[in-house]
Image (cartoon, rainbow, N blue to C red):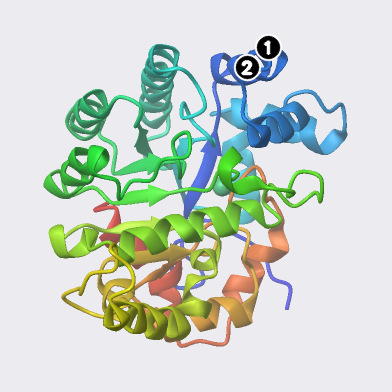
């Protein structure tokens, strides 16, 4: 069903898009330099070797739109009826770089985003990007993000050089998110060299598959290592329909409990709750790049209607009919308002 896409809530809800990307020229130049000098991992070489240099119309569109935080973006939001965009620095943020370079670049990007939010206060909300390579710096940047920049969430692009947030050295980052009452959004990047195997050669390293399995793996580690027993008030968000975890959840939950009972695995310890509990109380998933009614309804059925939020994934995805797919979902008006508006308002404390 086709209908006009207006901002302003004429369908009974505002549309808040929760996983919307921007880049800085400094960041894109740094990606290219990393690739050119052979310092990037396989995934970054594959992805930014392509996005950074391909002359195709689509990649040029994405580069231009990533860098724009004013007229093009606001026009695109008006054209697709997006009232508010929750913005974050595009993947892999600063996580592919050496620590000092990453800190300069990410701090500058956070300042760029703050200025954009100030220019468009009714349309943009920011998430603070961090550099997990320097845990203490990241803890301070999370506090600066909340207190000085007015940001409403923390963005991490999954693994940091093959390391995962459930590892002990990253605990202060999780604690800072919980203490500052900011949701942690784990956005995909491609798998680390230790995991990527033949995916590049098969053309499966990026958004087609690599992103999803790597980020789903990251979320699963957070679930099974007891992060939410340590921080019961922490909220973790993942995109793309929960990176397949909602679909797999029954079997994962069963096998996790079987693994604990078998005592074969040192790392599998009893948790305070089953995996369903954490997915329904600590995790939110967004619909970025997953405008599929069956998949969205599965997420709502598995996690509850308070746990699923709309995202477009602009500018990587910019298809007006995907907004209409959400508008036309066969769910109650109340559930739709939660999906499109009020869950984001609650999670990001807008
Ligand atoms: Ca994205």
Task: Assess whether mark 1 and mark 2 are in contact (beta carbons under 8 angstroms).
Answer: yes
Tell me if 220 is positioned left or right of 261 in this view.
Answer: right
Task: Find the residue positioned furthest to the right.
Answer: 56
- Let me know if residue 16 appears in the view: no
Would you name the residue on which mark 1 appears? Answer: 37
Name the residue located 70 percent from the left edge and 29 percent from the top edge.
45
Q: Is residue 152 above or below residue 221?
A: above
What SS does tag 1 mark? loop
How many other residues sit within 10 Å of disc 1, few (<14), some (14-19) or many (≥20)? Answer: few
Towards the viewer: 269 or 118: 269
For residue 307, which quarter of the picture? Answer: bottom left
Q: Is residue 269 above or below residue 119?
A: below
What SS does tag 2 mark? helix
Instruction: Quarter of the image for the N terminus: give it.
Output: bottom right
Name the residue located 49 percent from the left edge and 31 percent from the top edge.
93
Label 2 to label 1: alpha-carbon separation: 5 Å
Tell me if 116 is positioned left or right of 46 in this view.
Answer: left
Would you name the residue on which mark 2 appears? Answer: 34
For residue 50, which quarter of the picture? Answer: top right
- Let me know if residue 178 appears in the view: yes
| Position in image of residue 241 (x %, y %) | 53, 67
| Position in image of residue 168 (x %, y %) | 23, 44
| Position in image of residue 73 (x %, y %) | 60, 37
Towards the viewer: 95 or 90: 95
Residue 149 numbered tag: none
| Position in image of residue 136 (x %, y %) | 20, 26
């Amino acid at each position: 069903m086709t209908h006009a896409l207006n901002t302003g809530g004429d369908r009974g809800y505002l549309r808040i898009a929760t996983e919307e990307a921007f880049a800085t020229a400094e960041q894109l130049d740094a990606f290219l330099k990393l690739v050119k000098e052979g310092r990037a991992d396989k995934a970054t070489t594959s992805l930014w070797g392509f996005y950074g240099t391909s002359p195709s119309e689509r990649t040029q569109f994405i580069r231009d739109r990533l860098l724009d935080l004013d007229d093009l973006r606001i026009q695109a939001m008006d054209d697709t009826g997006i009232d508010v965009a929750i913005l974050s620095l595009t993947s892999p943020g600063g996580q592919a770089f050496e620590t000092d370079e990453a800190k300069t670049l990410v701090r500058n990007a956070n300042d760029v985003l703050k200025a954009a939010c100030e220019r468009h206060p009714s349309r943009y909300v920011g998430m603070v990007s961090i550099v997990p390579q320097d845990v203490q710096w990241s803890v301070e940047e999370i506090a600066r993000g909340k207190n000085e920049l007015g940001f409403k969430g923390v963005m991490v692009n999954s693994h940091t050089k093959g390391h995962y947030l459930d590892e002990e050295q990253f605990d202060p980052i999780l604690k800072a998110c919980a203490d500052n009452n900011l949701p942690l959004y784990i956005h995909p990047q491609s798998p680390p060299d230790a995991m990527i195997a033949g995916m590049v050669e098969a053309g499966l390293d990026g958004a087609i598959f690599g992103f999803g399995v790597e980020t789903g793996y990251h979320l699963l580690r957070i679930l099974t290592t007891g992060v939410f027993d340590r921080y019961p008030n922490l909220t973790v968000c993942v995109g793309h329909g929960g990176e397949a975890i909602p679909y797999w959840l029954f079997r994962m939950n069963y096998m996790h409990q079987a693994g604990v009972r078998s005592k074969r695995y040192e790392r599998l310890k009893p948790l305070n709750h089953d995996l369903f509990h954490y997915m329904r109380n600590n995790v939110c998933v967004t619909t970025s790049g997953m405008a599929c009614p069956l998949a969205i309804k599965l997420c709502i059925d598995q996690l509850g209607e308070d746990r699923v939020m709309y995202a477009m994934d602009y500018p990587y995805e910019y298809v007006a009919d995907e907004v209409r797919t959400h508008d036309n979902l066969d769910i109650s008006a109340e559930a739709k308002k939660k999906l499109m508006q009020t869950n984001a308002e609650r999670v990001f404390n807008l």
